Amino acid sequence: MQEMKWRADPLVWGHGPRVFEAFLEPTCPFSVRAFGKLDDLLGLAGEDRITIKLRLQSQPWHMYSGVIVRCILAASTLAGGKATAKSVMAAVAAHREEFEFERHCRGPNMDATPSDIIARIEGYSGVKLAEAFAIPDLDREIKWHCRYARQNGIHVSPTFMIDGLVQVDMSSGDTVAAWGSRLLKE
């Protein structure tokens, strides 16, 4: 069997000196709210002034979190790289409740399989993920995101870091302008 060559495209936008890292779980309603603000933040601050790094923070109480995180990272290995991964995450965000359990423990997803979840994401995003999802060592990328979060003391989403420092008083409920002012103050 031939070994598949692959590369996960880093989920990084912008190239400025200030680094904003967002640790998000794809089906968390607060993470979805934060995810929806990232493009506006980059537009407000400017790609030459900030760098946004998206870190995926799988959480076990979101029952299909691991499957969905793997789908997003698998998408980053495909044509389009990080843009494809972003479109997959946007599709999940737009249909968040269809990937979640009611009160984290019941509802229609009790009968869903990982294959059902992958097919649902493919349907909403238009991205064929099944083959990339099956990359045998894709878990090394998933483990990197997990390890990086833990090394920085991050266990829940959304959590934000600016220039390597966790911002405990920063929230997904903050405005884009408030995020921008924190990032751009000298």
Image (cartoon, rainbow, N blue to C red):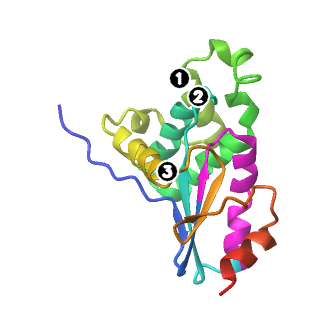
The residue where tag 3 is placed is 149
- For residue 64, the mark is 2
Image marks 1 and 3: residues in contact by CB distance under 8 Å? no
Q: Give SS at disc 3.
A: helix
Spatial distance from mark 1 to mark 2, Cα to Cα? 8 Å
Task: Point out the stretch of residues depicted in magenta.
Answer: 22-44
Residue 138 in the image: x percent, y percent? Answer: 36, 40
> On the picture, is 103 further left or further right than 125?
right
The residue where tag 1 is placed is 114
Amino acid beneath label 1: Pro
Amino acid beneath label 3: Ala
Amino acid beneath label 2: Tyr
Compare marks 1 and 2 and give the one earlier in the sequence.
2
Res 131 visible? yes
Spatial distance from mark 3 to mark 2, Cα to Cα? 19 Å
> On the picture, is 137 further left or further right than 47?
left
Image marks 3 and 2: residues in contact by CB distance under 8 Å? no
Compare marks 1 and 3 and give the one earlier in the sequence.
1
